[in-house]
């Protein structure tokens, strides 16, 4: 029984930083912005920021801004829009 609980916890923690289907297989760059840690992946004019640290009850507003800054830092592009939730944010990039 203990083994099952340990397996479930370890498996659950490893799934938390997994990229979405469209960004699977792309390398991630880890970025910290104002205490939030993100794994950022860029594909064309889209970016994904997966928050990998624990934070107590974050609202999406501050996380959205931080994720956008992390995406801009990694991509070198302006971020036009950020959608998602506290764990996974998707951004639309404006790269000239």
Image: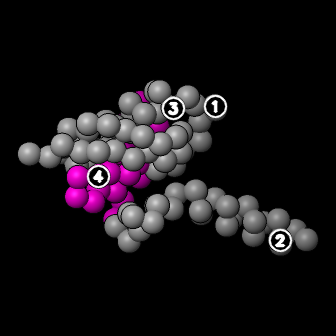
Q: Which residues fall within the magenta stretch?
A: 27-49
Q: Height in image: 12 above or below 3? A: above
Sequence-wise, the earlier of marks 3 and 2 is 2
Q: What residue sits right under mark 3 in the picture? A: 60
Sequence-wise, the earlier of marks 2 and 4 is 2
Where disc 2 sits, the SS reads helix
Residue at mark 2 to residue at mark 4: CA–CA distance: 38 Å
Q: Residues within 10 Å of mark 3 (few under 14, many from 20)?
A: some
Q: Position of residue 20 (x, y in %)?
A: 46, 61
Sequence-wise, the earlier of marks 1 and 2 is 2
Sequence-wise, the earlier of marks 4 and 1 is 4
Q: What residue sits right under mark 2 in the picture? A: 4
Sequence-wise, the earlier of marks 3 and 4 is 4
Residue for point 26% across, 48% down:
74
Closest to the observer, 80 or 5? 80
Picture quarter containing residue 2? bottom right
Q: Position of residue 17 (x, y in %)?
A: 52, 57
Q: Can I make out residue 38 in this image?
A: no
Indicate which label's residue lies in the foreground, 3 or 1: 3
Q: What residue sits right under mark 1 in the picture? A: 57
Indicate which label's residue lies in the foreground, 3 or 2: 3
Indicate which label's residue lies in the foreground, 1 or 2: 1
Q: Position of residue 65 (x, y in %)?
A: 38, 30
Q: Height in image: 74 above or below 79? A: below
Q: Residues within 10 Å of mark 2 (few under 14, many from 20)?
A: few
Residue at mark 3 to residue at mark 4: CA–CA distance: 19 Å
Residue for point 18% across, 43% down:
94
> Image quadrant for the N terminus?
bottom right
Residue for point 67% across, 61% down:
12
Where disc 3 sits, the SS reads helix
Residue for point 64% across, 59% down:
13
């Amino acid at each position: 029984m203990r083994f099952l609980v340990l397996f479930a916890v370890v498996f659950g923690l490893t799934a938390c930083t997994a990229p979405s289907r469209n960004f699977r297989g792309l390398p991630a760059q880890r970025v910290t912005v104002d205490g939030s840690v993100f794994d950022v992946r860029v594909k064309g004019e889209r970016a994904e920021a997966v928050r990998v640290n624990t934070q107590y009850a974050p609202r999406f507003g501050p996380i959205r801004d931080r994720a956008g800054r992390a995406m801009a830092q990694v991509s070198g592009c302006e971020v036009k829009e950020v959608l998602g939730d506290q764990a996974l944010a998707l951004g639309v990039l404006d790269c000239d």
